[in-house]
Image: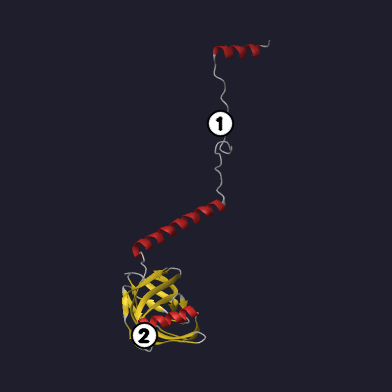
Amino acid sequence: MSDYDQQKIQNESVGYPQKPSPLPSSNDPRKYPSSPRRSPAKTLCTFLLILVILAGLVVLILWLVYRPHKPNFSLVGAAIYDLNVTSPPYMSTTMQFTVLARNPNRRVRLDYDQFSAIVYYKGQAITPPVVLPPLFQKTKSTVILSPLIRGASVPVSVEVANGLLIDEVYGVVGLRLVLMGKMRYKAGFVKTKHYEVYVKCDMLVGYKKGFMGQVPLLGSPDCQLDL
């Protein structure tokens, strides 16, 4: 064994410290491990998610502030100027109704479009649809609608024709006025989508054949709104 080996064994037995390993230099990549890079697609998805959440919060706040209510409709008058049955059978009709449309909202306006009116008797239309002008209803307001509805030689079933003749004898005729179209809410610069509006007003009127003019409404006419 050489002198060098004997000296090395002696140092180890005595417990001399070994020479430490060299520290990594500043250019050594092991000293500063690189952080994982965020992909652009993931960043974009996060941004879009935050944007959607903020938009939802804005819509929720606006809804809580304005909270739109449905409009109210009520029938207050009816007039019959023509109601005749001819062969084979046909029905000729001229009627006018007075309807109150009320907007109960304090901050929301109502815009009606493509509005029309039609009259039914015993479940069958006895007039063609009559187009009404657009309606822009202010907040907390009531508007009077007075559509004049005409139908010349509208084909009807035999049951409808005979039913009208019998009702005219008794002096009580049951009719249904239907208003239909599109409506949307508007608050400032915010507009909702268009909603389908269907209003049906069932009534009993006092009428006998040959009478023309305002007819009495029997009972309380009921107007129901489907929105």
Label 2 is placed on what type of residue? Lys
Q: Which residue is mark 1?
A: 23
Is tag 2's residue or tag 1's residue first in the polypeptide sequence? 1
The 10 Å Cα crowd at callout 1, few under 14, some 14 to 19, many 20 or more, is few
Q: Is residue 152 above or below residue 35?
A: below
Q: Nearer the viewer, residue 143 or 138?
A: 143
> How far separated are the C-alphas under marks 2 and 1?
112 Å
Task: Measuring from the top left, give residue 40's x and y in whole percent.
Answer: 56, 53
The answer to whether any part of residue 189 appears in the image is no
Which residue is painted at 45% across and 56% down in the image? 53
Q: Quadrant of the C terminus?
A: bottom left
Residue 88, label in figure: none
Task: Mark 2 vs mark 1: give the one in front.
Answer: 2
Residue 208 - label: 2
Residue at x 35%, y 65% (from the top left corner): 66
Asked if 47 appears above or below 193 in the picture, the reply is above
Residue 7 appears in which quarter of the rendering?
Answer: top right
Callout 2: few (<14), some (14-19), or many (20+) C-alpha neighbours within 10 Å?
some
Position of 199 relative to 45 (above/below): below
Measured as percent of width and height from the top left, residue 202 is found at 38, 74
Q: Position of residue 142 (x, y in %)?
A: 32, 76
In percent of the image, x 43 and y 85: which residue is there?
93
Q: Secondary structure at mark 2?
A: loop
Q: Nearer the viewer, residue 206 or 72?
A: 206
Q: Which amino acid type is shown beneath numbered disc 1?
A: Leu
Q: Is residue 183 above or below residue 83?
A: above
The image quadrant that residue 63 belongs to is bottom left
- Which x, y percent locates residue 199? 41, 73
Element class at badge 1: loop
Tell me if I can see residue 65 in this picture.
yes
